Image: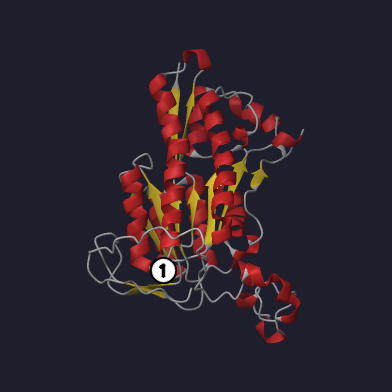
Amino acid sequence: MSFSLSRGLTPVRTRFASTSLIAPKVLASSSARLYSSTKSVFNPHDIHRVSHNPEHIQSKFPSKKDLRNAKRFREFDMEGRVYAITGGARGLGLSMAEALIEAGAKGETLTIPKTKFLSIDLFTDFNIAVYCLDRLEQPGADFLAAKEQANNEYGGLLEYVQIDVRNHKEVENTFAMIGAQHERLDGLIAAAGINHLQAALDYDRAALEDVMSINYNGVFNAATAAARQMFNYQQKGSILLVASMSGLIANKGMTSPVYNSSKAAVIQLSRSLAMEWGRHGIRVNSLCPGHIITPMVEGVFQQNPAARATWEAENMLGRLALPEEFRGCALFALSDASSFMTGSTMLIDGGHTAW
Protein backbone atom coordinates (compact mmCIF):
# COMPACT_ATOMS: atom_id res chain seq x y z
CA MET A 1 0.00 0.00 0.00
CA SER A 2 1.34 3.43 -0.85
CA PHE A 3 0.37 7.03 -0.26
CA SER A 4 1.64 10.36 -1.57
CA LEU A 5 0.98 13.94 -0.52
CA SER A 6 2.60 17.25 -1.41
CA ARG A 7 3.50 20.04 0.97
CA GLY A 8 2.97 22.63 0.10
CA LEU A 9 16.38 48.09 0.55
CA THR A 10 16.52 51.01 -0.53
CA PRO A 11 13.49 51.23 -2.74
CA VAL A 12 13.81 48.89 -5.68
CA ARG A 13 13.32 50.18 -9.19
CA THR A 14 12.75 47.83 -12.08
CA ARG A 15 14.63 48.04 -15.34
CA PHE A 16 11.59 47.74 -17.52
CA ALA A 17 7.98 48.81 -17.78
CA SER A 18 7.00 46.27 -20.42
CA THR A 19 6.84 42.47 -20.34
CA SER A 20 10.28 42.04 -21.88
CA LEU A 21 12.95 40.62 -19.63
CA ILE A 22 16.63 41.31 -19.28
CA ALA A 23 18.80 38.27 -19.91
CA PRO A 24 20.66 37.23 -16.78
CA LYS A 25 24.28 38.22 -16.61
CA VAL A 26 27.03 35.63 -16.57
CA LEU A 27 27.60 34.19 -13.10
CA ALA A 28 30.12 36.30 -11.26
CA SER A 29 33.63 34.99 -10.89
CA SER A 30 34.73 33.41 -7.63
CA SER A 31 36.68 36.52 -6.75
CA ALA A 32 33.60 38.74 -6.82
CA ARG A 33 32.15 39.91 -3.51
CA LEU A 34 28.47 40.42 -2.99
CA TYR A 35 27.11 43.49 -1.31
CA SER A 36 23.78 44.73 -0.06
CA SER A 37 22.17 47.94 -1.22
CA THR A 38 19.74 47.97 1.70
CA LYS A 39 19.92 50.61 4.36
CA SER A 40 21.58 48.15 6.70
CA VAL A 41 25.11 49.24 7.45
CA PHE A 42 26.14 45.74 8.47
CA ASN A 43 29.34 44.48 6.85
CA PRO A 44 30.75 41.23 8.27
CA HIS A 45 34.24 42.24 7.21
CA ASP A 46 34.06 45.29 9.51
CA ILE A 47 33.08 43.32 12.58
CA HIS A 48 36.18 44.46 14.47
CA ARG A 49 34.91 48.03 14.29
CA VAL A 50 31.55 47.35 15.96
CA SER A 51 32.44 48.96 19.26
CA HIS A 52 33.67 52.08 17.47
CA ASN A 53 30.71 52.55 15.15
CA PRO A 54 27.40 53.35 16.86
CA GLU A 55 25.58 53.06 13.53
CA HIS A 56 26.65 49.44 13.04
CA ILE A 57 23.71 47.04 12.75
CA GLN A 58 25.04 45.05 15.69
CA SER A 59 25.97 47.91 17.99
CA LYS A 60 25.03 46.97 21.54
CA PHE A 61 22.71 49.91 22.04
CA PRO A 62 21.10 52.16 19.44
CA SER A 63 20.94 55.84 20.21
CA LYS A 64 18.22 56.85 22.63
CA LYS A 65 16.31 58.72 19.95
CA ASP A 66 16.07 55.49 17.95
CA LEU A 67 14.56 53.44 20.77
CA ARG A 68 11.19 53.34 19.10
CA ASN A 69 9.67 50.03 18.07
CA ALA A 70 10.48 50.71 14.42
CA LYS A 71 14.18 51.01 15.26
CA ARG A 72 14.57 48.10 17.67
CA PHE A 73 16.29 44.92 16.57
CA ARG A 74 17.34 46.46 13.27
CA GLU A 75 19.06 43.25 12.21
CA PHE A 76 15.59 41.75 11.71
CA ASP A 77 14.45 44.57 9.44
CA MET A 78 13.48 43.19 6.00
CA GLU A 79 12.38 46.48 4.48
CA GLY A 80 12.93 46.75 0.74
CA ARG A 81 14.07 43.16 0.22
CA VAL A 82 12.97 40.52 -2.27
CA TYR A 83 12.53 36.83 -1.46
CA ALA A 84 11.23 33.66 -3.06
CA ILE A 85 9.70 30.68 -1.26
CA THR A 86 9.12 27.36 -2.99
CA GLY A 87 6.22 25.41 -1.54
CA GLY A 88 4.93 28.80 -0.44
CA ALA A 89 1.25 28.47 -1.31
CA ARG A 90 0.22 26.91 1.98
CA GLY A 91 1.33 25.38 5.26
CA LEU A 92 4.87 26.01 6.46
CA GLY A 93 5.98 27.97 3.39
CA LEU A 94 3.07 30.39 3.57
CA SER A 95 3.57 30.98 7.31
CA MET A 96 7.18 31.89 6.64
CA ALA A 97 6.16 34.20 3.80
CA GLU A 98 3.80 36.04 6.13
CA ALA A 99 6.61 36.50 8.66
CA LEU A 100 8.88 38.10 6.05
CA ILE A 101 6.08 40.39 4.90
CA GLU A 102 5.45 41.52 8.48
CA ALA A 103 9.15 42.18 9.09
CA GLY A 104 9.36 44.42 6.02
CA ALA A 105 6.19 46.39 6.70
CA LYS A 106 7.48 49.89 7.36
CA GLY A 107 9.32 52.82 5.89
CA GLU A 108 9.90 53.43 2.21
CA THR A 109 8.25 51.38 -0.50
CA LEU A 110 9.11 49.61 -3.74
CA THR A 111 7.70 50.94 -7.00
CA ILE A 112 6.88 48.01 -9.28
CA PRO A 113 5.28 48.35 -12.74
CA LYS A 114 2.66 45.88 -13.91
CA THR A 115 3.71 43.01 -16.18
CA LYS A 116 2.20 39.71 -17.26
CA PHE A 117 4.35 38.17 -14.54
CA LEU A 118 2.51 40.06 -11.81
CA SER A 119 -1.14 40.66 -11.00
CA ILE A 120 -0.57 44.00 -9.29
CA ASP A 121 -1.68 47.43 -10.41
CA LEU A 122 0.55 49.76 -12.38
CA PHE A 123 3.21 51.46 -10.26
CA THR A 124 1.99 50.07 -6.95
CA ASP A 125 4.31 50.71 -3.99
CA PHE A 126 5.42 47.96 -1.63
CA ASN A 127 7.76 47.66 1.36
CA ILE A 128 8.91 44.12 0.64
CA ALA A 129 8.30 41.55 -2.09
CA VAL A 130 7.82 37.83 -1.40
CA TYR A 131 7.12 35.39 -4.23
CA CYS A 132 5.43 32.12 -3.28
CA LEU A 133 6.23 29.44 -5.85
CA ASP A 134 4.23 26.22 -5.94
CA ARG A 135 2.85 23.66 -8.35
CA LEU A 136 -0.81 24.29 -7.53
CA GLU A 137 -2.71 25.64 -10.52
CA GLN A 138 -4.33 28.22 -8.26
CA PRO A 139 -3.47 29.08 -4.64
CA GLY A 140 -6.06 28.33 -1.97
CA ALA A 141 -8.12 30.57 0.28
CA ASP A 142 -5.35 30.83 2.91
CA PHE A 143 -2.94 32.32 0.40
CA LEU A 144 -5.52 34.73 -1.02
CA ALA A 145 -6.35 35.99 2.48
CA ALA A 146 -2.65 36.43 3.26
CA LYS A 147 -2.09 38.26 -0.03
CA GLU A 148 -4.90 40.71 0.69
CA GLN A 149 -3.61 41.38 4.18
CA ALA A 150 -0.03 41.76 2.95
CA ASN A 151 -1.03 44.30 0.31
CA ASN A 152 -3.63 46.26 2.27
CA GLU A 153 -2.34 46.21 5.84
CA TYR A 154 1.42 45.70 5.58
CA GLY A 155 2.24 47.38 2.30
CA GLY A 156 3.95 44.21 1.09
CA LEU A 157 3.85 42.38 -2.21
CA LEU A 158 2.87 38.72 -1.80
CA GLU A 159 2.66 37.06 -5.22
CA TYR A 160 1.92 33.53 -6.35
CA VAL A 161 3.72 31.93 -9.30
CA GLN A 162 3.01 28.40 -10.45
CA ILE A 163 6.15 26.38 -11.12
CA ASP A 164 7.32 22.79 -11.01
CA VAL A 165 10.60 22.69 -9.08
CA ARG A 166 11.57 19.54 -10.98
CA ASN A 167 11.76 21.55 -14.20
CA HIS A 168 15.21 23.12 -14.14
CA LYS A 169 14.62 25.51 -17.02
CA GLU A 170 11.29 26.69 -15.62
CA VAL A 171 12.87 27.34 -12.23
CA GLU A 172 15.78 29.25 -13.77
CA ASN A 173 13.45 31.38 -15.89
CA THR A 174 11.18 32.18 -12.97
CA PHE A 175 14.04 33.34 -10.76
CA ALA A 176 15.50 35.33 -13.65
CA MET A 177 12.17 37.13 -14.04
CA ILE A 178 12.02 37.92 -10.33
CA GLY A 179 15.59 39.21 -10.40
CA ALA A 180 15.00 41.34 -13.49
CA GLN A 181 11.78 42.71 -12.05
CA HIS A 182 13.55 44.12 -8.97
CA GLU A 183 17.23 44.15 -9.96
CA ARG A 184 17.94 42.06 -6.86
CA LEU A 185 17.14 38.88 -4.96
CA ASP A 186 17.93 38.73 -1.25
CA GLY A 187 17.23 35.10 -0.53
CA LEU A 188 15.23 31.92 -0.78
CA ILE A 189 13.34 29.50 1.41
CA ALA A 190 13.15 26.11 -0.31
CA ALA A 191 10.17 24.46 1.36
CA ALA A 192 8.60 22.38 -1.43
CA GLY A 193 8.45 18.69 -0.62
CA ILE A 194 6.35 15.54 -0.75
CA ASN A 195 6.16 12.29 1.17
CA HIS A 196 5.35 8.73 0.10
CA LEU A 197 4.64 6.06 2.69
CA GLN A 198 5.74 2.59 1.63
CA ALA A 199 8.09 -0.09 2.88
CA ALA A 200 11.48 -0.22 1.18
CA LEU A 201 11.08 -3.72 -0.29
CA ASP A 202 7.78 -2.75 -1.89
CA TYR A 203 8.70 0.80 -2.81
CA ASP A 204 7.29 1.95 -6.13
CA ARG A 205 10.05 3.06 -8.49
CA ALA A 206 8.01 5.91 -9.93
CA ALA A 207 7.30 7.18 -6.41
CA LEU A 208 11.01 6.98 -5.60
CA GLU A 209 11.85 9.16 -8.58
CA ASP A 210 9.05 11.59 -7.72
CA VAL A 211 10.08 12.05 -4.08
CA MET A 212 13.76 12.51 -4.90
CA SER A 213 13.11 14.80 -7.88
CA ILE A 214 11.03 17.18 -5.74
CA ASN A 215 12.67 16.88 -2.33
CA TYR A 216 16.27 16.93 -3.53
CA ASN A 217 16.50 17.91 -7.20
CA GLY A 218 13.85 20.59 -6.72
CA VAL A 219 15.70 22.07 -3.75
CA PHE A 220 18.96 22.00 -5.70
CA ASN A 221 17.27 23.67 -8.69
CA ALA A 222 15.77 26.43 -6.56
CA ALA A 223 18.94 27.07 -4.55
CA THR A 224 21.18 27.35 -7.59
CA ALA A 225 18.67 29.49 -9.51
CA ALA A 226 18.40 31.86 -6.55
CA ALA A 227 22.17 32.06 -6.08
CA ARG A 228 22.62 32.72 -9.79
CA GLN A 229 20.48 35.85 -9.49
CA MET A 230 22.22 36.92 -6.30
CA PHE A 231 25.55 36.66 -8.10
CA ASN A 232 24.07 38.35 -11.15
CA TYR A 233 22.96 41.42 -9.20
CA GLN A 234 25.89 41.37 -6.76
CA GLN A 235 23.49 40.88 -3.85
CA LYS A 236 24.48 39.21 -0.61
CA GLY A 237 21.80 37.30 1.26
CA SER A 238 20.65 34.05 2.76
CA ILE A 239 19.18 30.74 1.60
CA LEU A 240 17.26 28.40 3.90
CA LEU A 241 16.70 24.80 2.80
CA VAL A 242 13.84 23.09 4.60
CA ALA A 243 14.91 19.56 5.47
CA SER A 244 13.38 17.62 8.37
CA MET A 245 14.30 15.87 11.57
CA SER A 246 13.52 12.82 9.41
CA GLY A 247 16.88 13.49 7.77
CA LEU A 248 18.49 12.70 11.12
CA ILE A 249 16.29 9.92 12.51
CA ALA A 250 13.80 7.26 11.38
CA ASN A 251 10.31 8.28 12.52
CA LYS A 252 8.20 5.86 14.51
CA GLY A 253 4.84 5.42 12.82
CA MET A 254 6.03 6.68 9.43
CA THR A 255 7.53 4.18 6.98
CA SER A 256 9.15 6.53 4.49
CA PRO A 257 12.74 5.46 3.65
CA VAL A 258 13.05 7.64 0.56
CA TYR A 259 11.60 10.77 2.17
CA ASN A 260 14.00 10.39 5.10
CA SER A 261 16.94 9.90 2.74
CA SER A 262 15.97 12.90 0.63
CA LYS A 263 15.92 15.15 3.70
CA ALA A 264 19.32 13.88 4.81
CA ALA A 265 20.60 14.85 1.37
CA VAL A 266 19.17 18.36 1.77
CA ILE A 267 21.03 18.80 5.05
CA GLN A 268 24.30 17.88 3.38
CA LEU A 269 23.51 20.05 0.36
CA SER A 270 23.19 23.09 2.63
CA ARG A 271 26.68 22.50 3.98
CA SER A 272 28.16 22.05 0.52
CA LEU A 273 26.55 25.19 -0.88
CA ALA A 274 27.54 27.17 2.21
CA MET A 275 31.15 26.18 1.53
CA GLU A 276 30.94 27.26 -2.12
CA TRP A 277 29.17 30.58 -1.67
CA GLY A 278 30.11 31.82 1.79
CA ARG A 279 33.02 34.00 0.63
CA HIS A 280 30.66 35.72 -1.81
CA GLY A 281 28.19 36.83 0.84
CA ILE A 282 25.59 34.08 0.37
CA ARG A 283 24.83 32.09 3.49
CA VAL A 284 23.10 28.68 3.28
CA ASN A 285 21.53 26.86 6.21
CA SER A 286 19.01 24.07 6.68
CA LEU A 287 15.97 23.79 8.90
CA CYS A 288 14.93 20.46 10.42
CA PRO A 289 11.41 20.80 11.78
CA GLY A 290 9.71 18.18 13.86
CA HIS A 291 6.20 17.02 13.10
CA ILE A 292 4.06 19.95 11.93
CA ILE A 293 0.33 19.90 11.32
CA THR A 294 0.32 20.53 7.56
CA PRO A 295 -1.71 19.08 4.68
CA MET A 296 1.06 16.52 4.13
CA VAL A 297 1.01 15.37 7.73
CA GLU A 298 -2.79 15.26 7.77
CA GLY A 299 -2.47 12.85 4.85
CA VAL A 300 -0.22 10.60 6.92
CA PHE A 301 -2.87 10.53 9.63
CA GLN A 302 -5.52 9.55 7.09
CA GLN A 303 -3.51 6.48 6.16
CA ASN A 304 -2.25 5.73 9.66
CA PRO A 305 -4.54 7.28 12.32
CA ALA A 306 -2.40 5.91 15.15
CA ALA A 307 0.59 7.95 13.98
CA ARG A 308 -0.59 11.13 15.68
CA ALA A 309 -0.65 9.62 19.15
CA THR A 310 2.73 7.98 18.51
CA TRP A 311 4.33 11.22 17.40
CA GLU A 312 2.89 13.21 20.29
CA ALA A 313 4.16 10.59 22.77
CA GLU A 314 7.67 10.81 21.27
CA ASN A 315 7.69 14.59 21.65
CA MET A 316 8.90 16.19 24.88
CA LEU A 317 6.17 18.82 24.60
CA GLY A 318 3.50 16.19 24.03
CA ARG A 319 2.07 17.85 20.95
CA LEU A 320 2.68 18.59 17.29
CA ALA A 321 3.87 21.93 15.97
CA LEU A 322 1.89 24.53 14.08
CA PRO A 323 3.37 26.14 10.93
CA GLU A 324 3.25 29.54 12.64
CA GLU A 325 5.78 28.36 15.21
CA PHE A 326 8.49 28.51 12.55
CA ARG A 327 8.01 32.15 11.62
CA GLY A 328 10.76 33.27 13.96
CA CYS A 329 13.39 30.87 12.70
CA ALA A 330 12.66 31.86 9.10
CA LEU A 331 13.08 35.52 9.93
CA PHE A 332 16.27 34.82 11.87
CA ALA A 333 17.78 32.72 9.08
CA LEU A 334 17.05 35.18 6.28
CA SER A 335 17.86 38.40 8.11
CA ASP A 336 21.09 40.04 9.22
CA ALA A 337 20.47 38.59 12.68
CA SER A 338 22.09 35.34 11.51
CA SER A 339 25.01 37.06 9.80
CA PHE A 340 27.60 34.64 11.24
CA MET A 341 25.60 31.47 10.64
CA THR A 342 26.13 29.36 7.55
CA GLY A 343 26.39 25.63 6.94
CA SER A 344 24.31 25.12 10.07
CA THR A 345 21.26 22.97 10.76
CA MET A 346 18.47 24.38 12.91
CA LEU A 347 16.77 21.46 14.65
CA ILE A 348 13.37 22.58 15.96
CA ASP A 349 11.44 19.48 16.90
CA GLY A 350 9.91 19.96 20.35
CA GLY A 351 12.62 17.75 21.81
CA HIS A 352 11.74 14.74 19.64
CA THR A 353 15.38 13.89 18.93
CA ALA A 354 16.70 14.86 22.36
CA TRP A 355 15.53 11.78 24.29
- The answer to whether residue 324 of the structure is visible from this angle is no
Q: Which residue is mark 1?
A: 152
95 or 256: nearer the eye? 256
Q: In the rendered image of this protein, does residue 181 appear above or below residue 344?
A: below
Residue 49 seen from this side = yes
Looking at the figure, which quarter contains the C terminus? top right
Q: Residue at x 61, y 71 (%)?
A: 43
In this picture, residue 275 sits left or right of residue 97: right
Report the amino acid beneath label 1: Asn
Circle 1 Cα neighbour tier, 10 Å, few/some/many (<14 / 14–19 / ≥20): few
| 210 displayed left or right of 121 | right
Work out which residue is located at the far top of the displayed protein and give it: 201
Residue 260 horizontal/vertical position (percent): 56, 30
Instruction: Name the residue nearer the viewer: 175 or 355.
Output: 175
User: How many marks are shown on the rendered structure?
Assistant: 1
Q: Quadrant of the N terminus?
A: top left
Name the one closer to the observer, 16 or 26: 26
**66 over 92 or under it: above or below:** below
Q: Which residue does the image show at 33% across and 53% down from the upper left?
A: 174
Residue 109 drawn above or below residue 162? below
What residue is drawn where x is 27% and y is 72%? 122
> Residue 40 or 50: which is nearer the viewer?
50
Q: Position of residue 102 (x, y in %)?
A: 52, 65
Identify the element where label 1 is drawn. helix
Quick one: which residue is furthest to the bottom in this view?
65
